[in-house]
Image: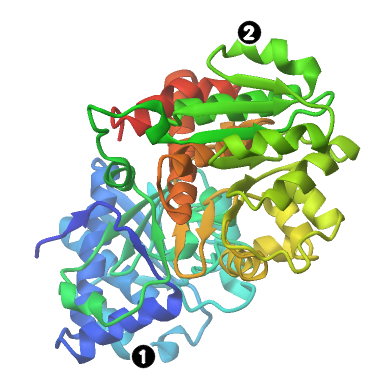
Amino acid sequence: MPVMRAELPATLYTAEQSRALDQTAIEQYGLAGFKLMQRAGHAAFATLLHHWPAIKSLSILCGSGNNGGDGFVVAGLAHQRGLAVQLLCVGGDDFEQKLQGEALEAWRWCQALGVQAHGYAADTELRGEVLVDAMLGTGLAGPVRGVVERAIRHCNRSPQPVLAVDIPSGLCSDTGAVLGVAVQADVTITFIGLKQGLFTHQAVDYTGQVEFDGLLVPEAVYEDVPVSAFRTQAEDVAQALGARRRSSHKGDSGHVMVIGGDLGFGGAAIMAAQAALRSGAGLVSLVTRPEYVSAALARQPELMARGVSSGQDLEPLLELADILVIGPGLGRNAWGDQMLLQALQSEKPMVVDADGLNLLAEKNWLRGARRGNWILTPHPGEAARLLSDDVTTVNQDRFVSVERLQASCGGVAVLKGAGSLSCDGDALHLCAAGNPGMAVGGMGDVLAGIIGGLWAQGLKPVDAARLGVYVHARAGDLQAAQNGERGLLPTDLLPCIQALVSGLHE
């Protein structure tokens, strides 16, 4: 049967929505559940052969649910191909009695082919050249325990590569959280609906390369089930920005004013301003401490740099700007207080980052300050302070947290981190790009500048936020691919930012 290996779709789904897709395909479009399970098994086996074409043996660990049923199909296909199959049933002595529906049908099909099955035990030797994880699917609700926990730890101790079927066992498909323990896969093949938890929080350390197969489900199925979130992709940048008119002038691309750089933090505001320029803003002003004006102009002479010592000095300058970017290097002293308060009173559209966010939380300036014309860009720690919560709670469900933040503050909220999220109250967007080399001081300042630069060019706030996050992350990936992740610096991204917003890279 044909296997439809495909590019990852843009749409993301919760576990409940994924089950609704399955049920819709079965009940409204006449696709038998076992037929879908067979297709999933074929897709998983094809993925396995694509990545490890020379293998001669497999160890397949199956649970008693539908995820295990997919594993039974893989076992049968491997057996038919002449591979040595070690099929291990993870679930206790009454494993076969637990099987129901399509999983039971797949078990009987597998047994009819002559595949030998054995119960998993702690002293079981995993003999296959590749391990296939088909133990737990998207229905996991609490921490993994018992024999499944032991089997997962066994897999993670073993040197063989691992293919996870639909989702690594032990991973929450809605949040990306590890529920006690989870399989660390090298490749994950997922089906029908792309699970939102595969791309954020702890999941990025467990999924390996994520691949997708739609199992030939009719497109109409997707019209009947709502989407949870959308992945931002390269084509979104091209569609939003497009080509500039040949008659364009600098005033058409907006004026960004970056405000920040208290004593000891001058570089942050300079980097944000550079990023705004490289993102395509027509004019960029930098308002900083007088001590840093010379350094800024030496670094980037295209900047219009002004030194100010008080909020009173800032006030007349604000009229020049279309978009404010405030927070990079702002500090938490009197100077920063005055800068932020003056910016807020101007009611100009603004990107608020770093110490701008911390001051909002510390001074309780968010009370009654919900507004529609700002973009807030916190990392989890800053988000926790804005929400009067703790970092663990924020990360426990990042999708819920970014929605809470937007509902509380208004505008657009960006929750940074692995799988950065943005929310404008109507839609959630996720960025799956980026790499751990970007975990270095100053990267957030560059992001704030990119978002401000894109917003100044006429994008809607939600598009400036989500596309800014993508351009920033993708620029980091391009640089890491060329020079490695370790030692990656925020200013290294600047040339790639220009290339990405100009359509020279996907």
Q: Which mark is residue 228?
A: none
Place of residue 241 in the rendered image (x, y in percent of width and height, measured from the top left) = 32, 41
Q: Residue at x 17, y 77 (%)?
A: 220
> 89 or 235: which is nearer to us?
235
Distance between the Cα atoms at labels 2 and 1?
71 Å
Q: Is any part of residue 292 visible from this angle?
A: yes
Q: What secondary structure is marked by label 2?
A: helix
Please report the residue visible at 58 percent of the width from the left and 31 percent of the height from the top: 437
Q: Callout 1: 10 Å neighbours few (<14), some, many (20+)?
A: some
Q: On screen, 62 above or below 47? A: below
Name the quadrant of the C terminus: top left
- Count how many numbered circles sit on residues in the image: 2
Figure quadrant of residue 310:
top right
**Depicted 131 relative to depicted 88: above or below:** above
Decide if residue 193 is on the left or right side of residue 327.
Answer: left
Q: Does label 2 or label 1 sit earlier along the sequence?
A: 1
Q: Nearer the viewer, residue 322 or 112?
A: 322
Q: Residues within 10 Å of mark 2 (few under 14, many from 20)?
A: few
- Measured from the top left, where is residue 469 in percent x and y? 49, 44
Task: Read off the residue under disc 2.
Answer: 298
What amino acid is at disc 1? Gln
Q: State the residue at coordinates (28%, 69%).
A: 192
Relative image position of residue 476 (x, y in whole percent): 49, 31
- Say how the picture is coloured: rainbow
Residue 126 in view of the camera = no
Identity of the amino acid at label 2? Answer: Ala
- Specify the quadrant of the image occupied by residue 264: top right
Question: What residue is shown with label 1?
Answer: 100
Q: Residue at x 54, y 64 (%)?
A: 171
Cβ atoms under marks 2 and 1 closer than 8 Å: no
Estimate the x, y position of residue 24 in percent, counting from the top left: 25, 86
